[in-house]
Amino acid sequence: MRRIAIAVAASTMTLSLAGCGVLDATGDGASASPTKGDDVTIGLLLPEKANSRYDKFDYPIIKSKVEELTDKKGKVEYANADADAARQAGQMQTMIDSKVDVIMVDAVDSHAIAGQVKKAKDAGIPVIAYDRLAEGPIDAYISFDNELVGEVQARTLLEALGSNVDTSDKVVMVNGSPTDPNAKQFKQGALSELNGKVTIAETYDTTDWKPENAATEMTEAINKIGKNNIAGVYAANDGMAGGVIKALKAAGVTSLPPITGQDAELDAVQRVVAGEQYMSVYKSYPDEAEAAAQMAVTKVQGKDIQFDALTQDKVDSPTTKAIPSKLVQVSPLVKSSIRDTVIADGIYTIDEICTPKYKAACAAIGLK
């Protein structure tokens, strides 16, 4: 089910409400949420450090937006679990004990965190699942359209393989961590495009999304299939794409097959420029992070009309049905779209991408 139109409708509704001057209104009667002023405390739990986006983009953007929305009176308490589910549970307990007003959690393990979500709920603290759909009685969810991410990756990979692609072409799938519900959705989206068009010669679910694990898996695939028999590699994110490339180079592959990625990390964008990685998926972290901050602040301040306008979609988790949600759009990042994505949105400058090592490759595609 595609939800882009719904997400756009949510944004349109937000603007319409702002124009009518009713965004600061709260709900009426028994359904109204308790209100709080600008002195809100947002607990932010992010999952890992292997992907640079969390410390570089998500946290600072959320912090800045919360300050903007609260006349600099609101604050964000931040913790990163570094891919350790037990550590994240402890971090969340600390936030519950310190009585933060609302918790945003990007779960290391979506199932394991359910108990802490319930504890927060019992303590009267709303919980928003950020980027990954956590189990338990969460109040809202914001992420990208994850099946669409997989579809975009797979379609772009098929385009790279050319018009003569068929089931004789062997593709290796290096999927994300089995504890991350997003990884399952990426995989489902990719398979919906790849099945029947190519042969999935080997497939892996990569523990903790670690590039070194992806490199080990790719080495195994090369040994099974043969380094010259791999037409393309579906790597679920940029970090693992880097591990895949290392394994291929270590095996003596000089002409790399098309390799996918996700997250538009700087080194991945540079690999795209250089032709080592065929594509990444650009996800607008400012859009996601700013909307999440708005959801958190409006939830705790009891601005029910605005909160509802921000969460027009409904998503089911294994434990909770019809979770108010917002899904943000994505787009493919290839050589020809770098300027219109990460540069246009101010994620990176041309100088940051086109370091001396990449100057010639940048010039060849018009990045000057």
Image (spheres, grey):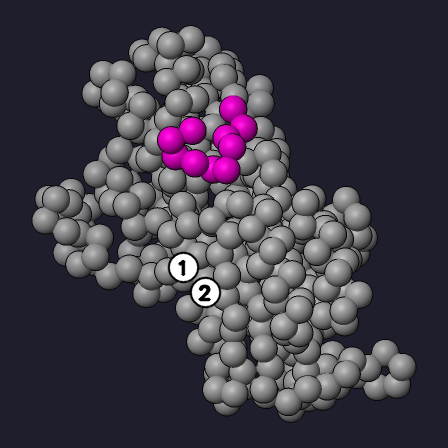
Secondary structure mainly formed by the magenta segment: helix
The residue wearing badge 1 is 55
Quadrant in which the C terminus is drawn:
bottom left
Q: Is residue 200 left or right of residue 21?
A: left
Q: Is residue 254 left or right of residue 243?
A: left
* Magenta-highlighted residues: 204-213
Instruction: Where is residue 310? Give x, y as percent.
Output: 65, 70
Residue 324's image quarter? bottom right
Disc 1: CA contacts within 10 A as few (<14), some (14-19) or many (>=20): some
Per the image, label 1 sits on a secondary structure element best described as helix
Residue 361's image quarter? top left
The residue wearing badge 2 is 59
Q: Is residue 264 left or right of residue 205?
A: left
Disc 2: CA contacts within 10 A as few (<14), some (14-19) or many (>=20): many
Question: Is-magenta flag for residue 289?
Answer: no
Q: Residue at x 76, y 69 (%)?
A: 123
Circles 1, 2 touching at the beta carbon (< 8 Å): yes
